[in-house]
Image (cartoon, rainbow, N blue to C red):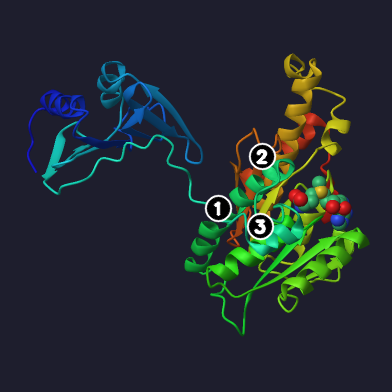
């Protein structure tokens, strides 16, 4: 480590950065004390495009990556490096330079000289979790007989895959935190898909987790008997009927009394509330729920507290506000019932406008009086009562 002056360090980075023949990548992350960064993390690397080398700058909001390419002399590296990040890592073909800026604003520098290759490919694709040719994807109708995703099913394929991409790390951390038991063959992980429909997600969760060596037992619930019969038949054809089954039942009246994990992808309107109520009542430890259309709260938003009519006077905005209010109240109810809850974007908006996921882990934390009060105040302000509250009698 050395403690040269911060500006001199930035200049050293800029010199290394300007040599696109040797630049491998740069990562900016963390936040300096009392500074705001434009994004959580920025990744920069040279890429080979038709017209020559460009600098690709990608930022993440924690979930999604957005990229922009610049001509090498126009890349805003000098601004970015000074924009509040606490850590800068620059790798080049002959070594790397790492900077950490301390709370006092001092640079701590680390150099090493491992040789690296440049990778200039511009569209490094995300690794696929589900092989389009997997027999289950053909059986459920996402892929055609040749193992290609059908164009009409591409959005569903993406939704399911991104849903799984979140399931695995969430599950792993819930297991390591002791919220969920480690699955074994004699005590597999139990998962219920509430409002499973054609069971794309249900089968995908089963196949993917089994492929990862996780012992699972999966149940799909849907009110439609035709869906149950079709899905059970597919399970039989795939020879997995011992560990996946389907029931034609209302979520609210299902005969299934327990699962470690509940999942629901676009269970219509208040079926999402049924799914959350089931989760709470049966003490499921983990829930990943992507709500569908919301009508319940919207229909109750009749007396608008001022000055909120600024938003609600426009139908489209009233609808979106109603969606947000519905999900925020659902989440608050879960929080007050001992879940740690967050809302995340689980798939790009181009694949579905319904791309918000409620992720909840049961920690058993006691309800906080201030949070109870906020919930009550919100209902009083908007003069609404969420369907979920009625289902739980709260
Ligand atoms: C929009 S589809 C989504 C299906 C599936 N999860 C997916 O993403 O492909 C909603 C499904 O929920 C089912 N459903 C709606 N209300 C239900 C309820 N109260 N109980 C059980 N299933 C319900 C419907 O039959 C339908 O199959």
Disc ID at residue 287: 3
* Residue shown at 60% from the left, 62% from the top: 364
Q: Is mark 1 within 8 Å of ligand 1?
A: no
- Mark 3 or mark 2, which is nearer to you? 2
| 344 vs 203: above or below | above
At which x and y percent is residue 337? 68, 56
Disc ID at residue 165: 1
Q: Is residue 147 visible?
A: yes
Indicate left or right for 271 with 99 as reference.
right
In the image shown, does 135 or 86 lie closer to the viewer? 135
- Mark 3 or mark 1, which is nearer to you? 1
Indicate left or right for 358 with 5 as reference.
right
* Residue shown at 15% from the left, 34% from the top: 107
Q: How much space separates mark 3 and mark 1, taking CA atoms?
A: 14 Å
Q: Is residue 272 visible?
A: no
Judging from the image, what secondary structure is the residue with disc 2 in?
loop
Local packing at callout 2 (Cα closer than 10 Å; few below 14, some 14-19, many 20+) is: many
Disc ID at residue 36: none
In the image shown, does 210 or 297 lie closer to the viewer? 210
Q: Name which of mark 3 and mark 2 comes first in the sequence.
A: 3
* Residue shown at 51% from the left, 58% from the top: 169
At which x and y percent is residue 386? 81, 42
Disc ID at residue 355: 2
Judging from the image, what secondary structure is the residue with disc 1 in?
helix
């Amino acid at each position: 480590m050395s403690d040269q002056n911060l500006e001199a360090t930035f200049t050293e980075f800029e010199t290394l950065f300007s040599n696109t023949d040797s630049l491998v990548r740069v990562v900016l992350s963390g936040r300096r004390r009392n500074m705001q960064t434009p994004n959580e993390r920025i990744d920069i690397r040279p890429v080979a495009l038709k017209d020559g080398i460009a600098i690709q700058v990608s930022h993440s909001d924690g979930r999604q990556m957005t990229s922009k390419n610049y001509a090498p002399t126009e890349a805003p590296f000098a601004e970015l490096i000074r924009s509040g990040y606490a850590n800068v890592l620059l790798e080049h073909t002959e070594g790397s330079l790492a900077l950490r800026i301390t709370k006092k604003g001092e640079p701590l520098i680390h150099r090493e000289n491992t040789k690296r290759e440049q990778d200039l490919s511009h569209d490094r694709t995300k690794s696929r979790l589900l092989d389009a040719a997997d027999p289950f994807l053909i059986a459920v109708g996402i892929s055609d007989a040749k193992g290609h995703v059908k164009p009409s099913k591409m959005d569903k394929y993406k939704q399911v895959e991104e849903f799984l991409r979140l399931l695995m790390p969430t599950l792993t951390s819930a297991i390591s935190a002791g919220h969920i038991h480690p699955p074994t063959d004699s005590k597999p992980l139990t998962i219920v898909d509430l409002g499973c429909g054609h069971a794309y997600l249900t089968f995908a969760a089963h196949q993917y987790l089994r492929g990862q060596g996780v012992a699972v037992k999966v149940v799909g619930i849907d009110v439609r008997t035709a869906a149950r019969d079709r899905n059970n038949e597919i399970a039989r054809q795939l020879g997995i009927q011992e560990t996946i089954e389907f029931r034609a039942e209302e979520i609210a009246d299902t005969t299934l009394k327990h699962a470690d994990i509940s999942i629901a992808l676009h269970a219509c309107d208040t079926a999402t509330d049924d799914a959350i109520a089931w989760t709470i009542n049966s003490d499921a430890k983990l829930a990943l729920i992507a709500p569908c259309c919301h009508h319940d709260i919207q229909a109750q938003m009749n007396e608008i507290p001022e000055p909120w009519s600024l938003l609600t006077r426009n139908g489209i905005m009233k609808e979106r506000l109603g969606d947000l209010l519905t999900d925020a109240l659902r989440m608050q109810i879960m929080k007050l019932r001992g879940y740690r809850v967050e809302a995340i974007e689980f798939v790009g908006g181009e694949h579905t406008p319904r791309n918000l996921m409620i992720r909840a882990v049961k920690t058993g934390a006691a309800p906080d009086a201030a949070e109870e009060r906020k919930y009550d105040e919100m209902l009083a302000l908007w003069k609404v009562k969420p369907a979920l509250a009625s289902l739980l009698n709260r």
